Amino acid sequence: MIHERVTIFGGSGFVGKQITERLAVAGSTVRVAVRHPDKVRHDGPPEIRGRIEAVRADVTDDASVRAAVEGANAVINLVGILYETGRASFTAIHEQSARRVATAARDCAAVRMVQMSALGASPDSPSAYARSKAAGERAVREVFPGATVVRPSIVIGPEDDFFNQFASMAGYSPALPLIGGGRTRFQPVYVGDVAAAVGVILDREDTAGKTYELGGPRTYSFKQLMELLLDQIGKRRLLLPLPFFVAEIQGMVLQNLPKPPLTRDQVELLKTDNVLGGHEPGLRELGVEPTPIEEILPTYLNRYR
């Protein structure tokens, strides 16, 4: 098994927990490298939990990254941020830390590496987030040419930050904002499908050095996603179009909060569709059938009714 021993940076997050548990079920020994290992919790029978080890690591520190990678034959980097705070800049986390993880993987003789990027990553993007994701891909490939890059669209599931955030907002607000009129298109992908894809990537040698774009079976406008959400939670709310220039002003103010609900850079992201480009392989090429989000939403949104 190629992924007999795996180190996952960011393995305690929404996507990371799914990947960790899937690999542990498949028989891998998984080392979850995070800043706060005491907070790592995984469900499942004891024999599965026994294959999961949490270790302290900071992706901005060479020594702790190398220590976390030592002995692993596969490395997965899931660490990412949606907004910048203090020293945690897009460049520091998405580019410099990605290079640091790839360097440790190479120096410790890991066989495989998977770098989690994002759909829309491009050096030409008007968004600093998307540019930094592209820079991270480039940095990893410079050090570890056989690394596999995974670019998901919005990842949805029980602990997602997308539908849960808007469902919560619908609980107290009479309206939901449609930035740019809600015309931006998305192709949400189920977190279980992302985890399955990563498992297949590690199992198949022919995935080395490739880039995979992961999206669900359908595309939706932002407005359609909000309509789907409201229908699922049984609420009627005004869908209020918000011009981009107004959202930009709001983002400039809100991005100064400790945990901003919107930033100017996120508004830039919303000006571009977040759908598969059709030039890279995806879930089906990995043998994973994309799950319709309509099958997943009832499993966790009904609690907002």
Image: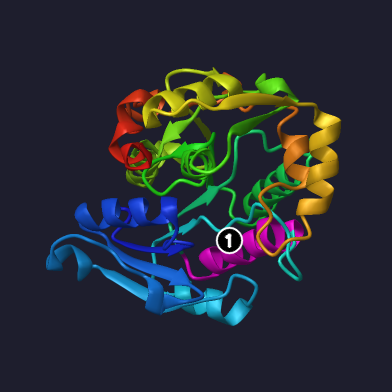
Is any atom of residue 273 visible in this view? no
Q: Quadrant of residue 235?
A: top left
On the image, the x and y values in percent for residue 247 come to: 79, 36
SS for tag 1? helix
Q: Quadrant of residue 95?
A: bottom right
Q: Is residue 175 left or right of residue 216?
A: right
Q: Which residue is mark 1?
A: 102
Instruction: Say which of 146 and 221 sits in front.
Output: 221
Q: Quadrant of residue 217?
A: top left
> As shown in the figure, which amino acid type bears the numbered disc 1?
Ala
Residue displayed at 38% across by 79% down: 38
Quadrant in which the C terminus is drawn: top left
Image height of 305 relative to 18, above or below: above
On the image, the x and y values in percent for residue 7 come to: 41, 65
Q: Is residue 110 left or right of residue 128?
A: left
**Numbered disc total:** 1
Q: Residues within 10 Å of mark 1 (few under 14, many from 20)?
A: many
Q: Is residue 34 left or right of residue 261?
A: left
Q: Look at the magenta stretch and give its main secondary structure.
A: helix
Is any atom of residue 224 visible in this view? yes
Residue displayed at 76% across by 52% down: 254
Q: Is residue 262 left or right of residue 247?
A: left
The magenta stretch is: 90-109
On the image, the x and y values in percent for residue 274 come to: 62, 28
Residue displayed at 25% across by 58% down: 24
On the image, the x and y values in percent for residue 78 come to: 51, 55
Image height of 238 relative to 47, above or below: above
Instruction: Say which of 112 and 78 sits in front.
Output: 78
Q: State the colouring used for the structure image.
A: rainbow
Residue 65 is one of the magenta-drawn residues: no
Residue displayed at 28% across by 60% down: 4
